Image (tube, rainbow, N blue to C red):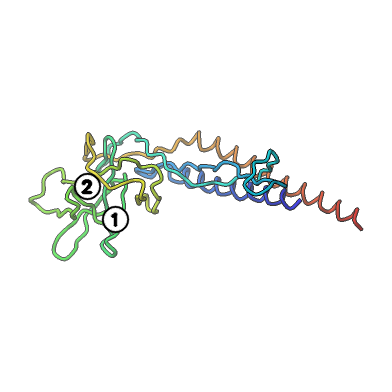
């Protein structure tokens, strides 16, 4: 009976986590450059019953399921016109490289709603959170009266973006398997435009309904297991 409680508890926890991801996606429906998070479930884990060590057995039992990770859908969405003087969008693959001026930590984003920040006597291109936007040489972009109409903003890409970590504030951090950042080939910088969120509201609502039903079924399994356990304890007495 303990196994049924454990399996049901895993189901409840996993579906709750899935609902949190879907809620976050929906909340960012109108966030520029936001990329949909997709919950990835791991395969059912099994263990052998009454089998000898290192010997195959057909007696397997499931221990439930869990969410392995929340991956990101990096597919490009429609570009919309913007009135911001320093708003940019990327047409094609690639991301903007950012540097935290306090820690020098590098992150990446598709959100190009930039502005200017005075540092010392000079103005630099920054994000809404104050992070420096870097050029192709990975240097902060100085903006003055001599700057070109379209700033030399760097666009970087990775051979593999699968598994990039969501860093909050619509930013991402690469992991080892993503490799090193390279100049994005074929990407085009569009001034006066911003990329819309790629969240599909209808799809998210459908998944919410599915997750809510699975959550309720897992709870019912906990209740049923509890009732059976109480019945067994009663018979023992």
Residue 94 visible in this rendered orientation of the protein: yes
At a point 26% along the width and 56% down the height, the residue shown is: 99
Instruction: Indicate the quadrant containing the C terminus: top left, top right, bottom left or bottom right.
Output: bottom right
Q: Nearer the viewer, mark 2 or mark 1?
A: 1
Structural distance between the alpha carbons of marks 2 and 1: 21 Å
Picture disc at residue 53: none
Residue 172 visible in this rendered orientation of the protein: no
Q: Does 139 appear above or below 60?
A: below
Q: Residue furthest left?
A: 146
Q: Nearer the viewer, residue 152 or 70?
A: 70
Badge 2 crowding class, 10 Å Cα cut-off, few under 14, some 14 to 19, many 20 or more, is many
Q: Nearer the viewer, residue 71 or 216?
A: 71
At a point 31% along the width and 57% down the height, the residue shown is: 129
Image location of residue 141, percent across then percent down: 17, 53
Image location of residue 67, percent across then percent down: 54, 46
Q: Is residue 182 left or right of residue 60?
A: left
Q: Secondary structure at mark 1?
A: strand
Q: Is residue 40 left or right of residue 95?
A: right
Q: Earlier in the sequence, mark 2 or mark 1?
A: 2
Q: Is residue 122 left or right of residue 214?
A: left
At a point 27% along the width and 61% down the height, the residue shown is: 104
Q: Which residue is mark 1?
A: 106
At a point 35% along the width and 52% down the height, the residue shown is: 173
Q: Which residue is mark 2?
A: 86
Whether tag 2 and tag 1 are in contact, CB under 8 A, the answer is no
Image location of residue 109, percent across then percent down: 32, 47
Badge 1 crowding class, 10 Å Cα cut-off, few under 14, some 14 to 19, many 20 or more, is some
Image location of residue 71, percent across then percent down: 45, 43
């Amino acid at each position: 009976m303990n196994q049924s409680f454990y399996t049901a508890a895993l189901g409840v926890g996993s579906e709750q986590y899935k609902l949190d991801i879907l809620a976050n996606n929906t909340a960012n429906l109108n966030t520029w450059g936001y990329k949909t998070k997709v919950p990835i479930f791991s395969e059912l884990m099994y263990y052998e019953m009454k089998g000898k060590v290192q010997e195959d057995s057909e007696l397997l039992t499931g221990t439930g399921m869990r969410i392995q990770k929340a991956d990101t859908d990096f597919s490009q969405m429609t570009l919309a016109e913007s009135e911001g003087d320093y708003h940019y969008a990327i047409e094609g693959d690639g991301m903007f490289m950012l540097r935290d001026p306090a820690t020098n930590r590098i992150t990446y984003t598709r959100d190009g709603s930039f502005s200017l920040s005075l540092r010392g006597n000079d103005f630099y291109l920054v994000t809404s959170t104050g992070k420096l936007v870097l050029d192709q040489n990975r240097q902060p972009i100085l903006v003055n009266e001599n700057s070109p109409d379209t700033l030399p903003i760097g666009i970087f890409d990775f051979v593999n973006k699968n598994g990039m970590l969501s860093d909050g504030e619509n930013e991402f951090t690469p992991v080892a398997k993503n490799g090193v950042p390279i100049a994005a080939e074929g990407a085009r910088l569009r001034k006066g435009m911003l990329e819309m969120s790629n969240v599909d509201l209808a799809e998210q609502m459908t998944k919410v309904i599915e997750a809510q039903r699975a959550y309720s079924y897992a709870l019912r399994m906990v209740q049923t297991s509890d009732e059976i356990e109480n019945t067994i304890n009663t018979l023992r007495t």
